[in-house]
Image (cartoon, rainbow, N blue to C red):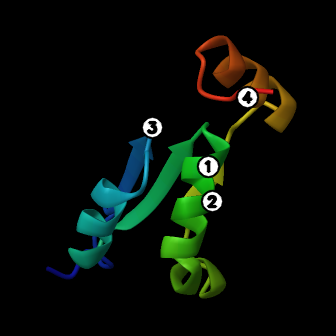
Amino acid sequence: MDCNSRQDDLIYDIGAHKGDDAAFYLAKGFRVISVEAHPTHASVIRRRFSSEIEDGRPVLEVVSQVSHRDEQASEMKKGLIHQ
């Protein structure tokens, strides 16, 4: 499928997690903008799609407002991190 000639070839993947949906649509020829708020998942996406990002293809937009300190505090409350 050649989506480059269509005007509706852009997919927004909101809450992209680790980029599985983005990978699916990229393989089909779509342009994908993934939005991920979790810094760890955004890092996974950046590594996974590093060649697409280097080529200037829109793959990821990180919208995280959570600092690493806030994330650690949250995980400490859940018992996931011990001091």
| Label 4 neighbour load within 10 Å: few <14, some 14-19, many 20+ | few
- Provide the residue designation for mark 2: 43
Q: Residue at x 52, y 81 (%)?
A: 52
Q: Secondary structure at mark 4?
A: helix
Q: Amino acid at mark 3?
A: Gly
x%, y% of residue 75?
65, 23
Mark 1 or mark 3, whichever is nearer to me? 1
Q: CA distance from mark 1 to mark 4?
A: 10 Å
x%, y% of residue 24?
24, 65
Q: CA distance from mark 1 to mark 2?
A: 5 Å
Query: Circles 3 and 4: CB distance less than 8 Å?
Result: no
Q: Residue at x 60, y 18 (%)?
A: 79
Q: Amino acid at mark 1?
A: Thr
Say left or right for 26 vs 72: left
Q: Residue at x 73, y 28 (%)?
A: 71
Q: Which mark is residue 40?
A: 1
Mark 2 or mark 4, whichever is nearer to me? 4
Q: Which mark is residue 30?
A: none
80 w.r.t. 79: above or below: below
Say left or right for 44 vs 66: left
- Provide the residue designation for mark 4: 71
Quadrant where the C terminus lies? top right
Say left or right for 79 vs 31: right
- Provide the residue designation for mark 3: 15
Comparing 60 with 12, the one in front is 60
| First of labels 1, 4 by sequence position | 1
| First of labels 3, 4 by sequence position | 3
Mark 2 or mark 3, whichever is nearer to me? 2
Query: Circles 1 and 2: CB distance less than 8 Å?
Result: yes
Comparing 36 with 25, the one in front is 36
